[in-house]
Image (spheres, rainbow, N blue to C red):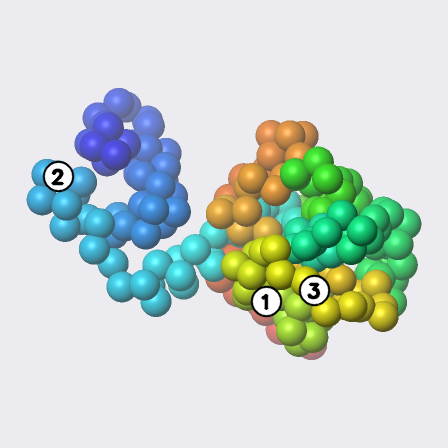
Amino acid sequence: MSHAYDTHKPGLKTKHLGFHKALCVLMGWNWHVAPDTSKAYQSVPAEEVNAMKRDLMVWPPVVLIHNSSITNKAKVSEAKIVTIEEIEGVLADIGVACDKAKITQGRPANQSVFVVKFLPTISGFQEAMRIHDHFSSENHGKEELHQILCEKGKSSVPADKLEELLHAHIALAEDLGYLDDETKKRCVVRSKNDIEARADATLNLDS
């Protein structure tokens, strides 16, 4: 932490401070305070920490789709294997064309996570957010997934439809562990608020 904050290498100060800020956000620390021995930099309100974490998204935009029947299976017999073709069908029902996204398996390698990758454009971001907002409105977003993970081992309520098994959300910096190696190598972390502002500006120009 001190190295990233105090570096004096020519031309690298900005990158080091950016790295320092990212580390602080992930750890829930205050990047405005020097990382000295007082530990004051480790004191940040939980609401502010959560807001900062929600702002750090993976770029190019990625949506993670979780198969809760595997994530939360009480018995192997309760797990339902979902194929990429079935995920494509769910996205088509939402209104996302398959030619606008690339779907791969994520991690862990038990077919519980799908990675939906979009182009690094405003339209790609808007398509990703279409999926995110749809699942969030159906109470199948990240918060609901977290509740399932906290109740791991309990029997799941039987699902009549495929979409009832799925939870989806935009990928944030804290979700990097779900990405396949190739996606992880090619991605960066950007401010979701900044991208949303650019998307809004684009819509205003078109109106």
Crowding near pointer 3: few (<14 within 10 Å), some, many (20+)?
Answer: some
- What's the residue at 65%, 73% (across, down)? 139
Circle 3/circle 2 CB separation < 8 Å? no
Q: Is residue 141 above or below residue 67?
A: below
Any mark on residue 156, and which? 3
Q: Nearer the viewer, mark 1 or mark 3?
A: 3
- What's the residue at 50%, 46% (across, down)? 173
- What's the residue at 85%, 70% (across, down)? 160
Q: Give the left or right position of residue 80, taking residue 73 as reference.
A: right
Residue toward you, 145 or 43:
145
Q: Quadrant of residue 89?
A: bottom right
Which circle's residue, 1 or 3, is located before the other in the chain?
A: 1
Tell me the distance, in whole angstroms, between the alpha carbons under discs 2 and 1: 38 Å
Q: Amino acid at mark 3?
A: Ser
Tell me the distance, in whole angstroms, between the alpha carbons under discs 1 and 3: 13 Å
Which circle's residue, 2 or 1, is located before the other in the chain?
A: 2
Circle 2/circle 1 CB separation < 8 Å? no
Tell me the SS state at disc 1: helix
Q: Quadrant of residue 195?
A: bottom right
Kindly identify which residue carries mark 1: 144
Q: How many marks?
A: 3
Kindly identify which residue carries mark 2: 36
Q: Residue furthest top?
A: 9
Measuring from the top left, give residue 57's x and y in whole percent. 53, 51
Measuring from the top left, give residue 51's x and y in whole percent. 40, 63
Is residue 126 shown to the viewer in this render?
A: no
Which image quarter is the N terminus in?
top left
